[in-house]
């Protein structure tokens, strides 16, 4: 059969083409490997900035406290559950009791789904959350011993930890029970560092971030103030790093502080000469407008053309970019966590009903509820296992 070129090929032309192909095939070596000079480096995908978000109005805040925050559209892609998560095996003893607590407004829907699913296994255990829905208010109720637990979509504030320990003589127990979201506004999005698109830097390490942003530099590095100190050459070598950050206290800056600036049990402090913003919203625009800028924010707030940087946790380690797969599988180090906080006396067990509820949440069936909701990301087993271990202490 002769292949056609276009609609029809003249027979003499087809014969000539077949002859030419045969000549070229005969002339070519039987095994001539093609050698390409492939440069090293990551694959870069370009996409449009996200739509800009605006702070909640007072009416929206009040509605969230009363009914919970309106859910965003789920991610189109959803991660597979970690096969290493243990299956939930309900306790054989009959459990009954009533427990109530508080919750962040963004967690009301997910918590309700957990309660409903757990009730299928233990119908005589009544779990509830009370209005107003706000993690900060629920934490105060926990400190006052007026709540059995509180679901919070961030780490507890330092002053709340101090107040709790002053009252009880030990720290509250905080157990990760879910990942945050990838980049849903208001729903505990992952965080990332970014530069102007012209900046040629390829990655940043935790040690470098500490040396740039921190006054305490607990990781041991000397101060870094120019792009040349990060390895850039030519016109960039002597240019100052214009560092943009979020003014304390804020859940975003506290997360970065705890993950990077805090080290060896010592609390890190920010340099006081940074370009601080009271809110996270302008950060991407500030960096996109300044060729020599460096900043960070939640991924939901990347609403200007900047370049996201892969991060290295330990020297010599892998640089991991903040794409969806890396965040969803917890390979990316700045994905966030949802916490179940409660007052557990060291060395004493929890009420068996609450312990059973936590065993359920930290199981394959409990994390399946997270995946079904589609907003937050289910834990991987290496994130869930320490929580189960805390129940034994």
Image (tube, rainbow, N blue to C red):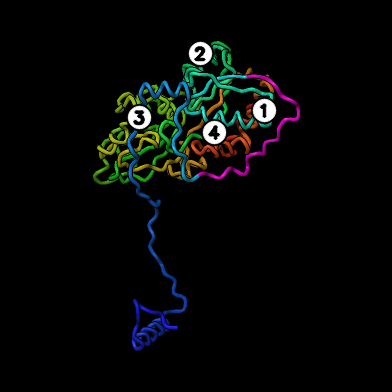
Nearer-the-camera pick, 57 or 43: 57
Nearer-the-camera pick, 242 or 193: 193
Q: Which residues are magenta?
A: 78-98
Position of the N terminus by quadrant: bottom left
x and y percentages locating residue 135 in the rendered image? 48, 22
Say which label, 1 or 3, has the lower sequence index: 3
* Image position of 282 (left or right of 210): left
Callout 2 environment at 10 Å: few (<14), some (14 to 19), or many (20+)?
A: some
Picture disc at residue 178? 4
Relative to 377, say whether 393 is above or below. Answer: above
Q: Secondary structure at mark 1?
A: helix
Nearer-the-camera pick, 372 or 19: 372
Check if mark 4's residue and mark 2's residue have beta carbons within 8 Å. no
Predominant SS of the magenta segment: loop
Which one is in front in this view, the residue at disc 1 or the one at disc 3? Answer: 1
Picture disc at residue 163? 2
* Quarter of the rendering containing residue 283: top left
Q: Residue furthest right?
A: 93
Say which label, 4 or 1, has the lower sequence index: 4
Picture disc at residue 356? 1
On the question of residue 186 being in view, the answer is yes
Q: Secondary structure at mark 3?
A: loop
Is residue 84 on the magenta stretch?
Answer: yes
Using the numbered discs, state the Cα–Cα distance from disc 3 to disc 4 in whole angstroms: 23 Å
């Amino acid at each position: 059969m002769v292949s056609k070129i276009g609609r029809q090929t003249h027979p003499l032309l087809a014969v000539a083409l077949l002859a030419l192909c045969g000549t070229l095939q005969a002339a070519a070596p039987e095994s001539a490997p093609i050698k390409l000079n492939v440069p090293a480096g990551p694959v870069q995908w370009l996409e449009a900035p996200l739509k800009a978000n605006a702070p909640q109005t007072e009416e929206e805040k009040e509605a969230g406290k009363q009914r919970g925050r309106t859910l965003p559209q789920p991610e189109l892609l959803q991660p597979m559950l970690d096969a290493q998560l243990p299956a939930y095996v309900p306790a054989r003893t009959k459990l009954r009791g009533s427990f109530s607590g508080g919750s962040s407004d963004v967690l009301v829907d997910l918590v309700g789904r957990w309660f409903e699913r757990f009730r299928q296994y233990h119908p005589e255990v009544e779990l509830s959350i009370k209005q107003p829905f706000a993690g900060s208010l629920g934490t105060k109720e926990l400190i006052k011993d007026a709540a059995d637990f509180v679901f919070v979509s961030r780490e507890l504030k330092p002053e709340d930890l101090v107040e709790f320990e002053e009252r009880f003589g030990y720290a509250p127990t905080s157990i990760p029970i879910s990942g945050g979201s990838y980049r849903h506004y208001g729903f505990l999005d992952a965080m990332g560092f970014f530069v102007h698109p012209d900046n040629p830097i390829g990655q940043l390490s935790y040690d470098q971030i500490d040396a740039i942003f921190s006054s305490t530099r607990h990781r041991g590095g000397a101060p870094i103030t120019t792009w040349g100190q990060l390895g850039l050459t030519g016109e960039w070598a002597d240019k100052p790093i214009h560092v943009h950050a979020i003014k304390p206290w804020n859940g975003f800056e506290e997360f970065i502080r705890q993950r990077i600036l805090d080290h060896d049990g010592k609390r890190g402090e920010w340099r006081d000469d940074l370009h601080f913003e009271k809110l996270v919203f302008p950060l991407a625009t500030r960096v996109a407008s300044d060729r020599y800028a460096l900043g960070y924010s939640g991924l939901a707030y990347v609403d200007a053309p900047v370049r996201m940087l892969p991060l290295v946790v330990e020297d010599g380690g892998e640089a991991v970019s903040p794409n969806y797969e890396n965040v969803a599988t917890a390979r990316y180090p700045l994905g966030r966590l949802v916490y179940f906080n409660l007052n557990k006396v060291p060395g004493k067990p929890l009420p068996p009903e609450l312990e059973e509820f936590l065993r359920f949440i930290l199981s394959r069936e409990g994390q399946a509820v997270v995946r079904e909701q589609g907003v937050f990301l289910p834990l991987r087993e290496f994130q869930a296992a320490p929580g189960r271990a805390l129940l034994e202490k």
